[in-house]
Image: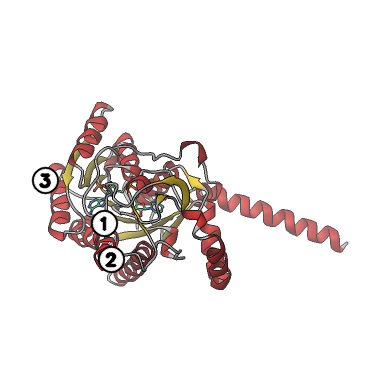
Amino acid sequence: MRLKPIAQQVVVVCGASSGIGREAALRFAERGAQVVVAARTASALESLVDEIRERGGSAVAQVADVAVFEQVQLVAERAISAFGRLDTWVHLAGVGLFATFEQLTMEEFQQVININLMGQVHGAKAALPYLKRDGGALIHISSMGAKRAIPLQTAYCASKHGIQGFVEAMRVEFQHDRVPISVTNIMPATLNTPFFDKARTKLGVKPVAPPPIYDPRIVVDAIIYAAEHPVRDLIVGGAAMGVIRTQTLSPRLLDAILRWVGYELHNTHVPKPENVPNSLFAPVEGWATVRGSFGEQTVARSMYTWLEIHPAVKRAVGGTLFGALALATMRKKR
Ligand SMILES: NC(=O)c1ccc[n+]([C@@H]2O[C@H](COP(=O)([O-])OP(=O)(O)OC[C@H]3O[C@@H](n4cnc5c(N)ncnc54)[C@H](OP(=O)(O)O)[C@@H]3O)[C@@H](O)[C@H]2O)c1
C-alpha cells in the first residue's frame, strides 16, 4: 500500500487543542498538508488555526466531543467540505483519571471509556467511508498502557487495551477485504504534555506516570512517519519498549515491581485537590500549549524510536552489530 507524501494530504487531527495533537497539527501544516483540527475547546482550536495560517499553512477547525458519534462525523464532513477529501485521520483525543478503582465512580469510569475508547471507534467509523475511496491512514494513539496496565489508572488502561483490541481486529478485516487503509497503533511512554495538569486526580497530588518523561515531539515524529509509511505498531520511547518486552517475558515480575513502586511513580508531591477543574466531563481552558509543566525533567530524544522510523539505518546498525559479533566469535574459536 502506498500513502501520499504529506504535502499532498488532507489530515484530520482529533484531539488537537493541546499536547501531541497540537504539535502534530503544526508539523503536518508545516510540511504542506491541509489540516482539520478538532477538540472540545473552541478558543484553543482558533489560536491553533491562527498560528498555522500565520506560518503560511492551511487549516480549519471543528469543535467536537469525540464521545458523541454525530459530532465526530461533523469533523469528517468538515474535511470534505473544506478540502474535498481525507487522506489521514490521527486520533489522539484522550483524558486521564488517577485514583484507585475503589475511589472511582461508575460514571467516571464510563466517561474515560466513552472518550478514550469509543472516541477512537467513532473516529475510525466516521473516517472509513472517505479513506476507503482513495486509500489513506488511520493512526490511533493509545499508550504503553495498551499492553501493560498499571495501578491507579484502571479506567485509562482498560480504554487503551480496548484500542489495541479494536485496532488489531479492524486491521485484519481491512487486509482481508483489500480496503486500502493503513492502520497504525502508536504506543507512547510518559510525555511532557498538559495531560497530567488537566487530568482528574483523587491522589491528593498532581499525578504523573512512570518515568522517564519524553518530549512530545518524539511522538509527532512517529505520527508523521506513519502518515507516509504503512506501519503496524510504533512504540514511542525506549522505556515503553522495555515495559512491553518485560510484560511479554514475565507479567508477574512487573506485578511485583508495580506493587512495590507503582504508587510512588504517580506522585509528583505537588498538592492538588480533587475539586480542581479537570478535563473529564468538560474541557478546561488555559492549556492551549504543546508542553506541560515537567520542563527540566524531559528527555528530548529516543534512540529506540528514531531507529524504528529510520528502518534502513536500523538494518545497517543491526547488520554491523551482527557482523562484529560473528567476527569476534570466529576469532575466539581460533
Ligand atoms: N501525556 C502522556 O504521557 C501520554 C502517554 C501515552 C499516551 N498518551 C495519549 O496521547 C493522547 C494525547 O494526549 P496528550 O498527552 O497530548 O494530552 P493533552 O494535551 O491533554 O491532549 C488531549 C487532547 O484530547 C482532547 N480531548 C479530550 N477529551 C476530548 C473529547 N471528549 N472530545 C474531543 N477532544 C477531547 C483535548 O482537547 P479538549 O480538552 O479541548 O477537548 C486535547 O486536545 C491521549 O490519548 C493520551 O492518552 C499520552
Numbered disc 2: secondary structure: loop
Q: Looking at this rendering, what residue extends furthest in the right direction?
A: 334
Q: Secondary structure at mark 1?
A: loop
Residue in view at x 79 percent, y 61 percent: 329
Q: Indicate the position of residue 283 as horizontal and vertical percent values.
A: 23, 47
Res 23 label: none
> What type is the residue that disc 2 sits on?
Thr
- The spot of residue 115 in percent (x, y) is 25, 59
Q: Are marks 3 and 2 in contact (CB under 8 Å)?
A: no
Regarding residue 299, the answer to whether it shows in the image is: no
Residue 186, how many percent across, how many down? 40, 56
Q: Earlier in the sequence, mark 2 or mark 1?
A: 2
Judging depth in this view, the residue of 227 and 152 nearest the camera is 152
Query: Which residue is the site of mark 3?
Result: 81
Q: Is residue 212 left or right of residue 181?
A: right
Q: Residue at x 28, y 66 (%)?
A: 105
**Amino acid at pointer 1:** Gly
